Image (cartoon, rainbow, N blue to C red):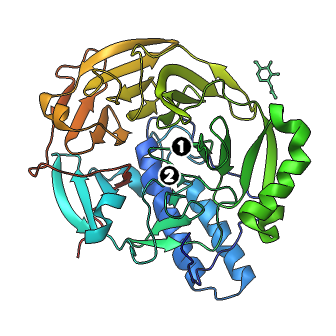
Amino acid sequence: MKSFALSTLSFSAAETLVPVTPPPLCPDLDKNEICSTECSDARDSCYSGCGNDYTCANRCNVVWLDCLETCPCSSGCPDGCDGCPHPVCESTEQYLFMINYDWSFDNKALLLRLSDDTFIESSFNYRFDIMDVDDACYSYIKGNHYFLGGYYNPRAIIKVTDCEFKLQDDELMVPHIDGMWGSCTTYFDQAHLCFSEDGVGAKKCQRFDGENQETDISASSFGSKMKKKRSIVFFYFGVHFFNNLREILTQESRHPHDWTAMAVYDNKMWVVGGCDPDDFSACHNHVEYYIHNNYSWFSGPEHPAEKVYGGLVLGDASGLYTFAGRGPNQGRSVFRMRSGSWSFLGQMTAAAGYSYYFSSGKIVGNFAYVGENNFEKVNLEDEAFPLSTNIGPEYESLNLYYAAMILTDRPICIE
Ligand SMILES: *[C@@H]1O[C@H](CO)[C@@H](O)[C@H](O)[C@H]1NC(C)=O
């Protein structure tokens, strides 16, 4: 791991503060994301004026929580924009702001304007001299956008703010490598970082909520817990972090899920397929789901493909979807699971066939925007025709690789 010297301020929101988790069935989660991102940007600016004054930082946190509460889909506006006075509900334009490791050498970013599917060049300071987010987990937690872990600095916690990466003082106490290794998603306002064989383990997860961390202690290793704890302390972290790590007794997943992806649907966190890190011929189609506060994995319906891995999994209120993947004939396929069974929705356009696979995507409204070297807009409405449209951009190799796609209602980071 590279060593970093940074003086980023880091304050803790008081532990009594209520987390704000938008209900997954709220009709305006896109507006909630834009709104909560603005609240968190405002909190960062507020912090930066505080120096070492902790009462000031606490005031920033109070303002931040009030701000989150007024967002559509928060407790102040439980029905989304219906009857919600927040100005974000008035804005008509939306953009996907995209950043990813493969563009870091050029400090490049792209905006996709969703009203007419046009791409707009923008820029982002990746601070590549000190930060490398190859195979990091992108996670959006209460308006904060993070890159967590990664191949070169598996304990890094990096925040996306003011058009640049900011390395945080805190680190992940258990290393995590995502992308071709583990999987992650945000579930109940916590990043769930799972299945990283050199970190928490091929059948386990750790969680991060922006401040606190939790790690699974599996039921099977419970007997050796004390021994394990001690070796973790010396091996990974150093005593300094020890008090921050909450250990949770969790059942392991039944299968390893290396090199796949997770998403939230029906209030559950799903993992679809993947591989055995000890045997790369052993990729599979097993589906499992995890329930918040239950700490158990349950078996779900198997994916129709014999093997599914190295693709994209997304969820929304009406289904869990897989896009492409590296299994046989999966390069363009789209499947949906709803109410316990899978169906084949169709193939993405031929253009998508030239992509190796898809690793990046986001659902906004009725559409999934998915990309790698090409960019597809997939219509998720029932019986949609055509299922997908290739929306460019012009140049062949887009090079999106586990990209963050952040919603905004105005063009950002344009020089
Ligand atoms: C988790 O759910 C299962 C099945 O509903 C139940 O038997 C078990 O007691 C639950 N465990 C916890 C810790 O809530």
Is mark 2 in CB contact (under 8 Å) with mark 1? Answer: yes
Q: Quadrant of ligand 1?
A: top right
C-alpha span from label 2 to label 1? 9 Å
Above or below: residue 371 compared with residue 237: above
Quadrant for the C terminus in the image: bottom left
Give amino acid for label 1: Gly
The disc label shown at residue 182, or none: 1
> Which element carries disc 2, helix, strand or loop?
strand
Instruction: Say whether residue 37 is left or right of residue 50.
Output: left
Instruction: Say whether residue 379 is left or right of residue 240.
Output: left
| Disc 1 crowd, CA 10 A, few/some/many (<14, 14-19, 20+) | many
The disc label shown at residue 87, or none: none
Quadrant for the N terminus in the image: bottom right
Question: Residue drawn 70% across and 60% down?
Answer: 173
Question: Camera-side residue: 180 or 373?
Answer: 180
Residue at image mark 2: 137
Question: Camera-side residue: 3 or 190?
Answer: 3
> Which element carries disc 1, helix, strand or loop?
loop
Instruction: Say whether residue 153 is left or right of residue 387.
Output: right
Q: Position of residue 125 (x, y in %)?
A: 35, 74
Q: Position of residue 87 (x, y in %)?
A: 40, 57
Looking at the image, which residue sits at the far bottom? 51
Give amino acid for label 2: Cys
Above or below: residue 207 compared with residue 105: above
- Mark 2 and mark 1 lie on one chain; the one further toward the N terminus is 2
Q: Position of residue 74 (x, y in %)?
A: 57, 46
Camera-nearest label, 2 or 1: 1
